[in-house]
Image (tube, helix red, strand yellow):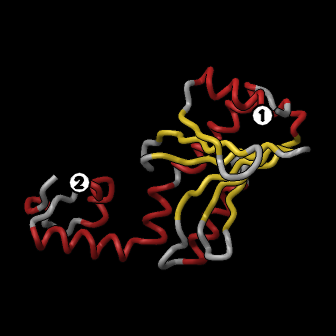
Amino acid sequence: MSQTTAVIERYLADAEIDWELGARDGEFVVSLPGERKLKTVVSLVAGETALTATAFVIRHPDENHAEFAQFLLRRNLRRPGVAYATDEHGDVYVVARVPSSAVDEDYLDTLLGTVLEASDDVFNDLLVLGFRSSMQREWDWRISRGESTRNLEAFRHLLDHGHGEQARS
């Protein structure tokens, strides 16, 4: 067991954070509860020389691609130690890479807090930028059928066009 792996295991146990071993050597899959997203799943990979953290944020946008990308790039300027990145499909992740020698419990606490914040805090903004038309169709469909709009309540101010009394929470 590497020193970094031991530090990660000790930190996760002490912090009582849900985790499991990942498929790769030295990988810990950590689940962090969110406020806007139900949870953020973070892959921590302790390599020989570095710790890499990766968390899925949101799938590729349906619309407003340039504005969506600019929003993320501007956010990169505000996030110390982590950055937004996309994969070959355009899905968005938060990533970080730090030398193993810098990893201790305090650093892990800061890292996971920063990753969670970067994933959770912007989630609703990204939904509106990249998926507003889909959300509007879903809202309208639910209203027309008298279905619950509870999972879209955070967006009522954008989606409800005077039909709020018909929606069920």
Question: How packed is label 2: few (under 14 Cα within 10 Å), some, or many (20 or more)?
Answer: few
- The number of callouts visible is 2
Left or right for 146, reference 1: left
Q: Which residue is mark 2?
A: 150
Left or right for 71, reference 134: right
Amino acid carrying mark 1 in the image:
Thr
Picture coordinates of residue 34 (x, y %)?
Answer: 47, 42
**In which quadrant of the rendered view does residue 113 lie?**
top right
Could one spot residue 56 in this view of the protein?
Answer: yes
Residue in the image at 63% along x and 59% along y: 93
Give the position of the N terminus as an image quadrant: top right
In three-dimensional space, the C-alpha distance between marks 2 and 1, rounded to whole angstroms, equals 41 Å
**In which quadrant of the rendered view does residue 100 lie?**
top right
Amino acid carrying mark 2 in the image:
Arg
**Which numbered circle lies on residue 14?**
none
In this view, the residue in front, 5 or 140, is 5
Image: 20 above or below 76: above
Picture coordinates of residue 141 (x, y %)?
Answer: 19, 74
Image: 100 above or below 60: above
Q: Which residue is mark 1?
A: 5
